[in-house]
């Protein structure tokens, strides 16, 4: 993989919270304009890895390179400003703010007011349900609507890389396919997506490259479809049918 | 019985309590600190107003601006020197609360020492309060025509700041979820400084106005703390408008409540703070979330439903 095609390169990442190490010696390369899925069981460290890319954990060692620049020590707000956006699994909207205010907060670091207005209209095109809820407080939205707002908020910063932490967890089954098709639209716009999912099959079906984590380590890697047909992977993580 | 005077006094007191409590609510909303040292932001405001007016000879409006600035700087210093370092270390809320009591003691006794050394233990801002126009059997005073509109102006400006400006919305976002605010590119430490300056400024302004109304001493901030907490707690400790309503309720409850108890049961007016204490206990027992826990839209919907249910009976 050439340097120009790499969006984020995590090199030898060891990170955690306080004194506790949660993930150890992680090497993951994220290709530009593609979906990279990180799957694994509960507690494997997937979400911690995503938070580490965004600077929300304690980095013990390793480097995070974004477009050739070492961003390991940048605070989260600065990482947003260089084009990385993050959608946490829970608490991913501002509940006391309206839908419109949430979108405005997504564009907080931007100075181009007119373009922000146009982008809000564009986002409403991707998530039409939000148009009907513009003045509603985010805390009153359903789980699916909230998730869509969370992704929309993250897109408002015009990211080059979007980190999604279990975007369909706690969402009604009929909304799941909607959210996945929206993720497809986002990638079609040239945005790199890192998708953390507990439901491995679903994530590996849509991704270009997949990483499997277990107990804080990367244990397998490869294109999503190949992993899905890998006997060892099926036995260990999907279970035989 | 002429109710105009007690009502006017209650509105005046309510305005002062509201101004004092808004900062405490803002502090908790944005930083999750239960700040006992808020009392001293009020006290410093009072002393600065009195000293600047009485000794330097500036106008009362200039003195109030000085009080706003002095308390804003003190609030900022409190955060930069104590709260923020503790917060960055991940100290729990209890540690921050205890730290706030420590800061309060340091500031209060520094104020005591300074006031004692300069012979100003007891002081009042020398601005005559004069009757302006008759209102029933009493008069509307020059103080009331300043303090009541000023409080409402501060409330309106803060409301506009929080709801119609990018920075204000970001402050609300930060109060909702600090991590998500950072993730959205909001520079939380810059906003935190702004919040502390607003907290200190409004508290200082309230203290300055109080020093015109009554004689103050270095304990006056601490003695007001119960009322400040009561107003904020009534508002759910996080609600801006809840605190405004809470401030006026405390003003009315203390002023009218103690007058009633005094007239009917001979209770000394010195027990007035007990009413605020009783309100705090009642809120914790009955509705700990205060006014913030009241869903106005569902309450209105219920009332509309009740109204509709009653209509056929009324017609029949």
Image (cartoon, coloured by chain):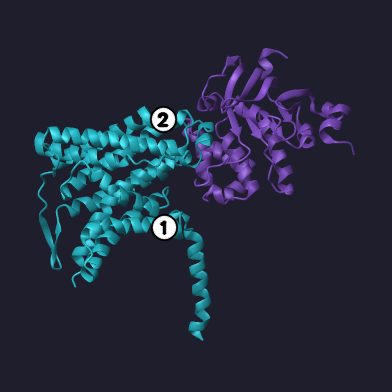
Chain letter, purple in picture: A
How many numbered marks does the figure carry? Answer: 2
Residue B84 numbered mark, or none = 2
Q: Quadrant of the N terminus of chain B?
A: bottom left
Residue B20 pos. (x, y %): 29, 46
Residue B283 numbered mark, or none = 1
Query: Residue A15: which quarter of the image?
Result: top right
Q: Residue drawn at (13%, 68%), measured in percent from left and top? A: B137
Q: Chain of mark 1?
A: B
Q: Residue drawn at (27%, 48%), measured in percent from left and top? A: B224
Q: Chain of mark 2?
A: B
Residue A59 pos. (x, y %): 58, 21
Q: Nearer the viewer, residue B293 or A2?
A: B293
Of labels 1 and 2, earlier in sequence is 2
Residue B311 pos. (x, y %): 50, 79
Asked if residue B152 shows in the view, the reply is no
Asked if residue A155 shows in the view, the reply is yes
Query: Residue A3: which quarter of the image?
Result: top right
Query: Residue B114: which quarter of the image?
Result: top left
Check the image and report above or below for A53 versus B207. Answer: above
In the image: residue A29, left or right of residue B66: right
Residue B58 numbered mark, or none = none
In the image: residue B33, left or right of residue A170: left
Q: Nearer the viewer, residue A25 or B141?
A: A25
Alpha carbon separation for disc pair 1 and 2: 30 Å
Please, which residue is most extreme toward the bottom here?
Answer: B316
Give the SS element for disc 1: helix
Residue A146 pos. (x, y %): 61, 45
Chain letter, cyan in picture: B
Q: Residue drawn at (28%, 55%), measured in percent from left and top? A: B273
Check the image and report above or below for A203 versus B151. Answer: above
Give the SS element for disc 2: helix
């Amino acid at each position: 993989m050439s340097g120009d095609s790499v969006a984020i390169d995590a090199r030898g990442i060891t990170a955690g919270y306080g004194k506790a190490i949660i993930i150890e010696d992680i090497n993951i390369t994220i290709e530009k304009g593609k979906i990279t899925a990180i799957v694994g069981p509960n507690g494997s460290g997937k979400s911690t890895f995503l938070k580490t890319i965004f600077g929300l954990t304690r980095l013990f060692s390793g480097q995070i390179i974004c477009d050739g620049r070492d961003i390991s020590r940048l605070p989260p707000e600065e990482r947003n400003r260089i084009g990385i956006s993050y959608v946490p699994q829970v608490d991913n909207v501002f509940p006391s703010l309206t839908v419109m205010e949430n979108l405005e907060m997504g564009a907080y670091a931007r100075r181009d007011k007119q373009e922000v207005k146009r982008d809000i209209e564009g986002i409403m095109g991707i998530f039409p349900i939000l148009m009907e809820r513009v003045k509603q407080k985010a805390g009153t939205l359903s789980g699916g609507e909230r998730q869509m707002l969370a992704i929309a908020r993250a897109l408002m910063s015009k990211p080059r890389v979007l980190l999604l932490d279990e975007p369909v967890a706690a969402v009604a089954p009929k909304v799941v396919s909607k959210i996945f098709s929206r993720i497809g639209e986002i990638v079609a716009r040239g945005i790199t997506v890192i998708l953390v999912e507990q439901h491995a099959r679903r994530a590996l079906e849509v991704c270009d490259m997949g990483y499997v984590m277990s107990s804080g380590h990367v244990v397998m890697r490869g294109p999503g479809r190949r992993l899905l047909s890998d006997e060892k992977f099926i036995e260990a993580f999907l279970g035989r049918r | 019985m002429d109710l105009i005077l007690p009502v006017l006094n209650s509105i005046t007191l309510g305005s002062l309590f509201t101004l004092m409590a808004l900062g405490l609510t803002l502090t908790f909303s944005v930083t999750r600190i239960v700040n006992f040292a808020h009392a001293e932001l009020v006290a410093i405001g009072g002393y600065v107003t009195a000293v600047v007016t009485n000794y330097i000879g500036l106008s009362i409006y200039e003195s109030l601006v000085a009080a706003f600035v002095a308390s804003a700087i003190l609030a900022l210093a409190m955060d930069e020197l104590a709260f923020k370092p503790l917060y960055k270390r991940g100290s729990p809320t209890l540690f921050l609360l205890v730290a706030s009591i420590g800061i309060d003691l340091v500031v209060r006794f520094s104020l005591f020492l300074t006031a004692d050394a300069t012979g100003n233990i007891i002081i009042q801002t020398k601005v005559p309060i004069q009757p302006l126009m008759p209102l029933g059997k009493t008069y509307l005073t020059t103080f009331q025509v300043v303090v009541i509109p000023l409080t409402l102006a501060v409330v309106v400006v803060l409301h506009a700041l929080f709801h119609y400006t990018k920075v204000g919305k970001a402050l609300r976002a930060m109060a909702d979820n600090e991590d998500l605010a950072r993730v959205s590119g909001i520079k939380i430490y810059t906003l935190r400084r702004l919040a502390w300056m607003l907290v200190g400024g409004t508290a200082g302004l309230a203290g300055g106005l109080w020093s015109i109304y009554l004689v103050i001493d270095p304990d006056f901030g601490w003695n007001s703390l119960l009322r400040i907490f009561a107003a904020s707690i009534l508002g759910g400790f996080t609600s801006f408008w809840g605190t405004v309503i809470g401030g006026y309720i405390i003003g009315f409850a203390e002023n009218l409540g103690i007058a009633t108890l005094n007239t009917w049961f001979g209770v000394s007016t010195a027990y007035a703070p007990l009413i605020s204490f009783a309100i705090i206990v009642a809120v914790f027992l009955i509705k700990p979330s205060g006014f913030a826990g009241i869903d106005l839209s569902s309450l209105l919907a219920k009332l509309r439903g009740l109204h509709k249910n009653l209509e056929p009976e009324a017609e029949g």
